[in-house]
Amino acid sequence: MAAEAQTTPTTAAASARPSTRLVIDKATKIYQTATGPLLALDSFSAEIGEGEFVCVVGPSGCGKTTLLWALSGLHPLTSGAITLDGTPVKGPRPEIGMVFQEANLLPWRNLMKNILFPFEIKRLDAAPYRTRIQHLLETVGLAGFENKFPRELSGGMQQRASLVRCLSFDPSVMLMDEPFGALDAFTRDEMNLLLLKLWSEQRKTIVFVTHSIVEALFMADRILVMTPRPGRLAREVVVNLPRPRTLEMQSSPYFVETAREIKELIHASVKK
């Protein structure tokens, strides 16, 4: 069963992909450290299609977050290139939103003021976006909490707020750096279902970094499996699960077997 999921870009499943939005071409990143140069990414190449939900998994320290920051334009590559709609990504782009591992809400600002903070940074008038923001708050269950401070919100509520903040200015690409990793298992399931609901409504192009193979399989159209540092593309997995996804799918033979194969692939690469 799991063999069906292991495909390459030349297969029929891959050729049916939507038009390409993001192209990662031989992305290489070397950090200069006190003990010498550190090769974090090594000629990593992949393509992300319009409206795709792509997850990135791999062993700890393999360069997943480095890749995501390079996609955001916040960390320049040492060599190689990243393009969005054919244009090089060399700095922050208005089309790209990012959700971090922590909610990063400013403790002295209430929820609404935290959501509006990016508009202040970008010097954008938030007025045209107010209806959108209110709809997002209602969708994620935060309507009525606009005047609450972060300390008054649970971890799951804070991450919901970070989703609203990212989506508030309507980016077409979302980069997500293990945003639910610190949540308990029940809340994490809730957040996964919520994100899939938002994605199904808005069809953003999403690149989602996670340490959880189960989370990646549950969420993604495709999974990019990375090697240990320096990060390279070890395998691409096309996820053959219908949408909408349900938690019950996680106990299906296909799901269990595919998760096992990805786990074994990562463990084998670490032992080399």
Image (cartoon, rainbow, N blue to C red):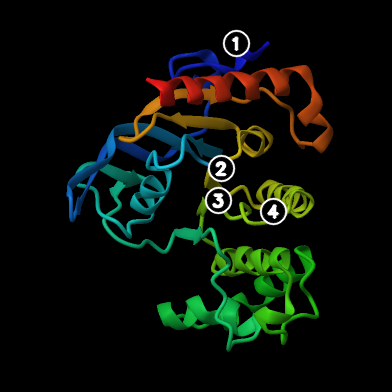
Which percent across, then down, holds residue 94? Answer: 42, 64
Going by the numbered disc 3, the residue's amino acid type is Glu
Q: Earlier in the sequence, mark 2 or mark 3?
A: 2
The residue that label 2 is drawn on is 51
Residue at figure coordinates x 65%, y 39% from the top left: 215
Rendered view: 195 above or below 53: below
The residue that label 1 is drawn on is 3
Tag 2 secondary structure: loop
Going by the numbered disc 2, the residue's amino acid type is Gly
Which percent across, then down, holds residue 192? Answer: 70, 48
Q: Nearer the viewer, mark 1 or mark 3?
A: 3
Going by the numbered disc 1, the residue's amino acid type is Ala
Would you say the residues marked 1 and 4 are in contact, meaning their CB atoms lie under 8 Å apart?
no
Would you say the residues marked 4 and 3 are in contact, meaning their CB atoms lie under 8 Å apart?
no
Which percent across, then down, holds residue 196? Answer: 70, 47
Q: Nearer the viewer, mark 1 or mark 4?
A: 1
The residue that label 3 is drawn on is 178
Using the image, tell me which numbered label, if any, was put on residue 198. Answer: 4
